[in-house]
Image (cartoon, rainbow, N blue to C red):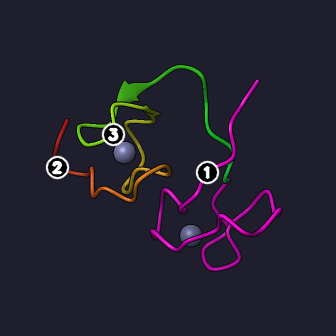
């Protein structure tokens, strides 16, 4: 089971109101995984390849 992202993990664009599986802006997948690393801001699961947290839009690139 996966959760829908609120923000694009690649470009940070808000996508919460969209049902699209991919970001309209950059084409990144907007579904989130069950496993990964924890966002330093909201502690939810993100991928280490994510630039922005898809849940809170925290800029994560240099955190890990
Ligand atoms: Zn995007
Ligand atoms: Zn977060």
Measured in 3D between alpha carbons, the distance from the residue under mark 1 to the one under mark 3, in whole angstroms, is: 13 Å
Give the side of residue 5 with respect to residue 10, left or right.
right
Element at label 2: loop
Residue at the disc numbered 2: 62
The stretch drawn in magenta includes residue 57? no
- Which is nearer the eye, 3 or 23? 3
Q: Is residue 10 above or below residue 61?
A: below
Distance in Å between CA atoms under marks 1 and 2: 20 Å
As drawn, 18 above or below 46: below
Which of 51/34 is in front?
34
Gap in angstroms between the C-alphas marked 2 and 3: 16 Å
- Please tell me whether mark 1 or mark 3 is closer to you in this view: 3
Q: Is residue 40 left or right of residue 57?
A: left
- Crowding near the residue tagged with mark 3, few <14, some 14–19, many ≥20 C-alpha atoms within 10 Å: few
| 63 relative position to 49: left or right | left
Label 1 C-beta lies within 8 Å of the nearest ligand 1 atom: no
Task: Give the quarter of the image for residue 58.
Answer: bottom left
Residue at image location 83% in from the left, 62% down from the top: 19
Some atom of ligand 2 lies within 8 Å of the CB belonging to the residue at label 3: yes
Sequence-wise, the earlier of marks 2 and 3 is 3
Question: Which residue in the protein does label 1 denote?
Answer: 5
For residue 55, above or below residue 15: above
Ligand 1 shown in quarter: bottom right
| Residue 18 picture location, percent across and down | 77, 68
Point out the stretch of residues depicted in magenta. Answer: 1-29
Of the residues tagged 2 and 3, which is closer to the observer?
3
**Residues at marks 1 and 2 touching, judged by CB atoms closer than 8 Å:** no
Q: Residue at x 72, y 69 (%)?
A: 17
Q: Secondary structure at mark 1?
A: loop
Q: Position of residue 56 (x, y in %)?
A: 41, 53
Q: Which residue is mark 3?
A: 42
User: Left or right: 22 with respect to 14?
Assistant: right
């Amino acid at each position: 089971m996966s959760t829908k992202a609120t923000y694009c993990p690649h470009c940070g664009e808000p996508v919460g109101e969209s049902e699209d599986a991919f970001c309209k802006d950059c084409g990144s997948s907007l579904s989130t995984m069950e496993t990964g690393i924890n966002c330093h801001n909201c502690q939810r699961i993100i991928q280490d390849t994510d630039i922005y947290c898809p849940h809170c839009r925290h800029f994560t690139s240099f955190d890990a």
